[in-house]
Image (tube, grey):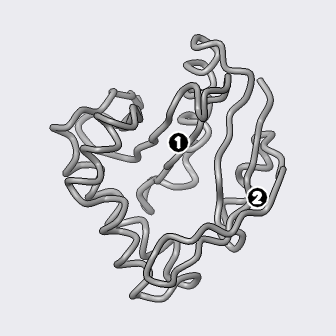
Amino acid sequence: MISLKEASIADISTIQDVANKTWPITYGEILSKEQLDYMMDLIYSDESLINQIQKQEQLFYIAYEEASVLAFIGIEHNYKDEAVTRIHKIYILPEAQGKGIGKLLIDAVQKIANENNSTSLSLNVNRFNKALAFYQKLGFEIIAEENIEIGNGYLMEDYKMEKKL
């Protein structure tokens, strides 16, 4: 049985472990190794994750099957002071993909979003990420394209997606 646990600062190494195992597979054909390394440090360093949890008020949930970690998701309610729950991150270990865990995480976040009076879920996905079809299958729609400069001359080329609740 799969369970979700809200993460704390004590779980940073678990989040980093999942990111380190999923990012090279997810983005290895999309981004250069240099950009991948830069983004991992930018987003998943201890300092960055502590800031995300404490100052940016992101909530992280870790999915487990018994004692085994399967995935994590990072969200933020009232994104940009609107009735929106933002999914900042969702990563599932390669060996756990295709087992319904992504849908389970999105469903759980949708329930939490409803409890927080959100009117929609939003997320960004790289325009070349295979997960795009997954999000569309779950009812997310592309509402915009965004090119986000992240430093060192790197650019995130994303679709902004939304699912009305």
Q: Amino acid at mark 1?
A: Ile
Examine the image and state in which quarter residue 108 appears. top right
Q: Position of residue 121 (x, y in %)?
A: 68, 33
Q: Amino acid at mark 2?
A: Ala
Q: Position of residue 146 (x, y in %)?
A: 72, 63
Residue 65 position (above or below residue 158):
above
Asked whether 44 or 106 is in front, the reply is 44
118 left or right, relative to 31: right
The total of numbered circles placed on residues is: 2
Residue 63 appears in view = no
Residue at the image point whose x is 15% and y is 38% from the top:
10
Q: Secondary structure at mark 1?
A: helix
Q: Nearer the viewer, mark 1 or mark 2?
A: 2
How crowded pointer 2 is (Cα within 10 Å; few <14, some 14-19, many 20+) is rated as few
Disc 1 designates what residue? Answer: 101
Disc 2 designates what residue? Answer: 133
Task: For the C terminus, give its image quadrant.
Answer: top right
The mark that comes first in sequence, 1 or 2, is 1
Residue 8 appears in view = yes
Asked whether 18 or 160 is in front, the reply is 160
Q: Secondary structure at mark 2?
A: helix
Residue at the image point whose x is 58% and y is 82% from the top:
30
Q: Residue furthest left?
A: 10
Q: Position of residue 145 (x, y in %)?
A: 78, 62
Examine the image and state in which quarter residue 77 appears. top right
Residue at the image point whose x is 72% and y is 69% from the top:
127
